[in-house]
Image (cartoon, rainbow, N blue to C red):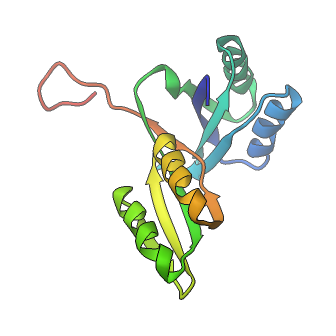
Amino acid sequence: MENRHVISVLVENKPGVLARVSGMFSGRTFNIHSLTVAPTLDTDYSRMTIVTDGREQIIEQIIKQLRKLINVAKVQDLTRGDFVDREMVLIRMKATAAKRGEILGINDVFRGKVVDLTHDSVTLEVSGNQNKIEAILELLAPMGIQELIRTGTVAISRAKKSKLPGIIQ
């Protein structure tokens, strides 16, 4: 995705916050490619990870509008620094005896897990960055993907290195 941005939004755990955030995007015709929400260590807050795209001017506008919303505590464009992101996908494949070995071989290369196996299908779980997920889907598609479910991106900024050995800031 060109001009992909991963935006981290710390929000208060209050009713209607998700609706306000998604409403801000739809009201201004910004697209959300993925959106994940989960509690943080502090139960008063949740973290939203929003993947969107756009020119720098559009991203600046999105960030400014998010900061204006009620119950939004912090907004950070993780794409502007070092961050780690992951996504998980469940893939159910038609797996005849002839294709099963090839499917399992590809799964092993991508360090996926087999989470369900029947006589005629196999369900794989694969996690990694967007490029890894797209790569395995491209290889498996010709073999008959029956269904897939993606979690959307979760991301965290990388720890800053300290000038003192062994200390992370």
Residue drawn at x 67%, y 27% as measured from the top left? 53
- Between 67 and 161, the one lying in front of the other is 161
Measured as percent of width and height from the top left, residue 72 is found at 67, 33
Name the quadrant of the C terminus: top left
In the image, residue 25 above or below residue 126: above
Query: In the picture, which quadrant includes the N terminus?
Result: top right
Residue nearer the viewer, 10 or 118: 118
- In the picture as drawn, the residue positioned furthest to the left comes out as 165
- Asked whether the viewer can see residue 142, the reply is yes
Q: Residue at x 67, y 31 (%)?
A: 52
x and y, in percent, of residue 122 in the image: 52, 76
Q: Is residue 123 above or below residue 18?
A: below
Looking at this view, name the residue that lies furthest to the right: 27
Q: How many marks?
A: 0
> Compared with residue 93, is residue 59 higher up or lower down, i.e. above or below?
above
Residue 121: name its quadrant.
Answer: bottom right
Tell whether 79 sits left or right of 35: left
Q: Quadrant of residue 93?
A: bottom right
Residue occupying the point 18% across, 30% down: 167
Indicate whether 64 appears above or below 40.
Answer: above
Residue drawn at x 37%, y 65% as measured from the top left = 105
Furthest toward the bottom, the residue is: 119
